Image: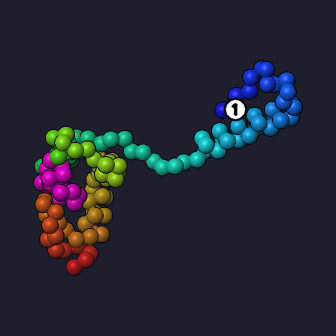
Amino acid sequence: MIAVSNASRGWLAPDVLVSAQEAESIRNKAASATVVGLLVPPQDAKQVREQLGVTQAAFSGQFGIPLATIKHWEKGRRTPDQAANVLLYLISRMPTKIERCLRQSGQQINATGQLTGGGAGH
C-alpha cells in the first residue's frame, strides 16, 4: 500500500497522488486475480481408508501406496505431502474411478511396493 501522509500531500501534485493511488489499485487487483495454485486441505488417510471399508493392505494394493506409508500416516509418524493429499482427496470422492485409472495406467505392485507384473507395461 502506498502511504501518503497529510504533510506530504502539500508538495505532491494532485495528478501524481492520483496516479500513485491508481497504480496501487491496479497492483492489488492483479495480485488478487492471480491464481498461483490449488491447495487441497490435509486429508485423514485413516478416515479415507475406513470410508471405503478396507484394510490397510487392501488400500495399499488398490491405490499403489506402500503399506508402510499408510501405517506411518495413520499412526501420525508422517503426514501426507501435497501430492498425497490430492490423491487421498480424489480417492475419497471417486474411489472406483481412481482405482480403475491406476490399474489401466501402470504396473501392479504388492503391499511392500514391489512390482508384481500385469498392467499396461506388461
Magenta span covers which residues? 56-71
- Nearer to us in this view, 33 or 78: 78
Q: Where's residue 120, x and y in %?
A: 26, 75
Q: Where's residue 60, x and y in %?
A: 17, 56
- Nearer to us in this view, 23 or 94: 23
Magenta stretch: includes residue 22: no
Name the magenta segment's main secondary structure.
Answer: helix
Q: Is residue 7 above or below residue 30?
A: above
Residue drawn at (15%, 47%) of the image: 71
Q: In screen coordinates, is 56 left or right of 80?
A: left
**Label 1: which residue?**
2
Asked whether residue 90 is in view, the answer is no
Magenta stretch: includes residue 64: yes
Location of the N terminus (image quadrant) = top right
Callout 1 crowding tier (Cα within 10 Å): few <14, some 14–19, many ≥20: few
Residue drawn at (70%, 37%) of the image: 24
Residue drawn at (65%, 38%) of the image: 28
Q: Give amino acid for label 1.
A: Ile
Q: Is residue 23 above or below residue 5?
A: below
- Secondary-structure class at tag 1: loop
Q: Is residue 105 above or below residue 14?
A: below
